Amino acid sequence: MSKRLWQITEFPFQPERLQHFETIFAIGNGYLSARASFEEGHEGDRPATLVHGIFNNAPGEAVPELAVAPNWLPLRITIDGTPFTIQTKAREYLRPAGGIVLGYRRTLHLDRATLRREVLFRAESGSTVRLEFERFASLDQHHILGQRLIITTLDSAPTIRINADLEHVPDNDVGHWTCANAAADTDQISWTAVTSQSGYRIALASRLIAPGCVESAVEENRATLATTFQLEPGQAATVDKLTSIYTSRDVADPLAATLLLNSAEADAYDALYEQHCRRWQEVWDSSDFVIEGDDKAQIALRFAAYHLLIAAPREDDDVSIGARTLSGLGYKGHVFWDTELFALPPLTLTQPNIARNLLAYRYKRLAGARQKAKEYGCAGALFPWESTDTGLETTPQWSDPQPDGSRIRIWTGDTEQHICSDIAYAVLQYWRWTGDDAFLCAMGAEIVLDTAVFWGERVEAKDCRYEISCQIGPDEYHENINNSVFTNRLAQWHLEQALKLLGWLADNAPDTARRLVKSLDLSEMRLARWQDVVDKMYIPFDRERQLHIQFDGFFDLEYIPVLDYQPRVGGIWPFLGHERALRSQVIKQADVVMLMALLGEEVGPREVMLNNFKTYYPRTDHGSSLSPAIHAWVAARLGLDEIAYEMFEQAAATDLENNQGNVADGIHAAACGGLWQAALFGFCGLHLTEDGPQVDPKLPAHWRRVSFSVTYRGEKHRFDVVNPAV
Ligand code: IFM
């Protein structure tokens, strides 16, 4: 298929979108990601390489965040003494002094996770050179980063000087690193540092393979490798920079590992790159979703899958995907429900090993979840709303200052408790699709059952029914409300599944059943209560109008016709203000609609589903990037074709077109996973039957055909869906 559908291009340079492109052109390999900052730097850039799991709570900061690793990208180039830079303002193209950029094109190659940039540059001396940059984070050897520069002179014999650096990133630093040490060996440079609070050690080493005699030095705030050479007219020179990186999460002595790896691989760019591409080919063989008839949707889906695939830990089951992946510092790298309900399901279907790693991350943090439940006065496990390396709650309690200087109390860490069921849902979905009983017995069952223990204690018995007060559902505009239908129904479903799971374990894995009954104290009395909650949970429902009520009193709030507020970027919350939003029926994101996506027909008959959608869709401002894709999915199932496609387009534009206005802070992992799910579960109607996976397509009218594979219980199932309507 056409290469064009695997590429995203910036042409010409768009300075006003510098940080946007830094995010969307990030490269990565599941171990780390690097934002797409220029090798030579640029005013206003935000270079950042983020490595999974390297969190630090810097002095004076309320919560931990991912610490930006030292910068391995810098290549400072001079041509006949003119420093190579990209000018920002068009008029600078005409400036008589300094170099001139004659042409610029940058392309992200999704199929091979490679970023390329070509620049035609004229030095002050009049020499014109073409610079072709390439970079990748090896998928084959996760600790190696490759950069290549091919520099070709067109019309003269310029002298080229190149400095390849490792350096600290001061702009992003809030005191994360101490003990930084730059060193220069005869043929390589290195950088080591230690996080100030968490004590993680990091080491990077670089080598330069280039014409001329390469010399190394330590300068202020950087270690550098330098070479100078001359080109004949028409001649091209290749410069390779290879960097290796380790942390103390990987090995006992990161510096030793880094130096060893770097010297072993120093002359092997081509071989490394070839292996990298081969590995990506394998990944795409099981992850691609091909659409015929809609090039824009095709590129958007590949882009979404690409960003999940570069963020997803392939070889580490002790880390997870943050809400903004590793491509930016939004939400400080914290992990939310975005992972389990948005990013993870497509991985369960296409890359089950990665999905298992993500679930194991939660299992390994059950201690933190138990502590949180205990602090809340309940037994069982209550996962934190925002999670990092420790597994403790890391949601900040106060927002950053608002325009008027005030701060808003953030309640999600206190009362957004549906995360327990979101994680249980992901575990059970993974188990059903993979049949991985070993995982279930070793980890999954304990997650599902101990979070069920929490719900069993958390629910409140009132007037012959069970209620849950003071919650935040997915719609975070409404805080500390009573009887969120999403939360109540999901908790009920969760307890029902927990009882079934225990029955399955008793029949199929009696030792595990016995162990968990004992360790989690699953007494007869506790189980009887679960059944009672399943039977008597209060699900707010309006019988007259045959629809679910998002929470107690929702329809008493002020009605605001959200659909009238068009066109706009982002939600309408900023013009309403926090207080009015709380008192209105404006909904931030799919809430009842999210419930319908997760539980499908279990929520109610088609008439109720339609009533729900038609009631809540016009009240939702999609102030969260999690919302549009879920609406697309549910609308497609309900046959609301126009809305489904419009919402799909909106989800697709989240990062590519920056329609929430905050992509500089990182890719929206949930929007990516949501988009993929909207295609699989929404438009294709993928579902499990007793005979395995089946589809029930409701494709957009202009999609001629789609094809994709999913792995079910270790076997690949290929679907090729032709649209009968075309
Ligand atoms: O988890 C989401 C939440 O649902 C809405 N606000 C942003 C969070 C992180 O993406």
Image (cartoon, rainbow, N blue to C red):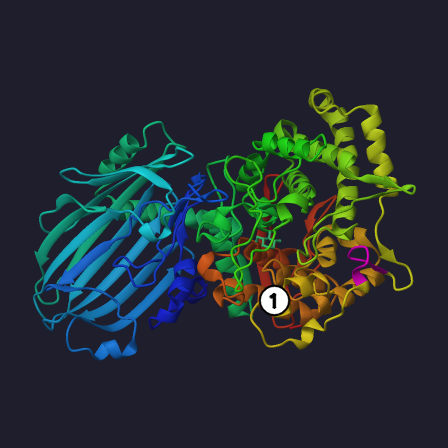
Q: Which residue lies furthest to the front in this view?
A: 405
Q: Quadrant of residue 90?
A: bottom left
Q: Can residue 548 be seen in this view?
A: yes
Left or right: residue 120 versus residue 302 is left
Report the front residue among 362 and 556. 556
The residue that disc 1 covers is: 571
Q: Can residue 3 be seen in this view?
A: no
Report the front residue among 2 and 686. 686
Image quadrant containing the C terminus: bottom right
Q: In which quarter of the image is residue 122?
A: bottom left
Please say if 216 is above or below 375.
below
Report the amino acid beneath label 1: Gly
Left or right: residue 230 versus residue 643 is left
Range covered by the magenta-colored residues: 547-555
For disc 1, the neighbor class at 10 Å (few under 14, some 14 to 19, many from 20) is: many
Residue 93: x and y in percent read 24, 77
Report the front residue among 591 and 407. 407
Q: Is residue 552 magenta?
A: yes
Residue 67: x and y in percent read 40, 44
- Disc 1, SS: loop
The residue that appears at 73% across and 65% down in the rendered structure is 584
The residue that appears at 22% across and 49% down in the rendered structure is 165
